[in-house]
Amino acid sequence: MTINDYKITFKNCKNNHTFSNILFNEFKDFQIINESKIDCSICKNNKNETSNNKFYKCCKCNMNLCPLCKLNHEKKYKDENHIRL
């Protein structure tokens, strides 16, 4: 992270993301995730459409999963080491 002229730049994170020229007063809004843009990788349902807005992530497959698809995914890969959050 670097700060120059009241602007923040993030680079070289573990996922190779780079974000530049974020003003101090915009930093709080920058961290807000627009959940309406998160879709299930399998059925394409939106996170806002699920019960209690719950979603999961399979870290091995790097998939976003709604609750129903999560159950099916767990059944399919029950013998493999899939990690869910």
Image: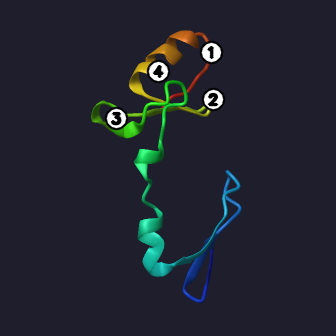
Q: Is residue 62 above or below residue 11?
A: above
- Residue carrying label 2: 60
Q: How is the image coloured?
A: rainbow
Q: Dot 2 surroundings within 10 Å: few (below 14), some, or many (20 or more)?
A: few
Residue 41, given in percent of the width and then of the height, sits at 55, 30
Q: Which mark lies nearer to you, 3 or 4? A: 3
Lower sequence index among marks 1 and 3: 3
Q: CA distance from mark 2 to mark 1?
A: 10 Å
Give the residue drawn at x 50%, y 29%. 84
Q: Which kind of residue does numbered mark 1 sit on?
A: Glu
Lower sequence index among marks 4 and 1: 4
Q: Which mark lies nearer to you, 2 or 3? A: 3
Q: CA distance from mark 4 to mark 1?
A: 17 Å
In what element is the residue under mark 4? helix
Q: Which mark lies nearer to you, 1 or 3? A: 3
- Residue carrying label 3: 49
Give the residue drawn at x 54%, y 86%. 6
Lower sequence index among marks 2 and 3: 3
- Residue carrying label 1: 80
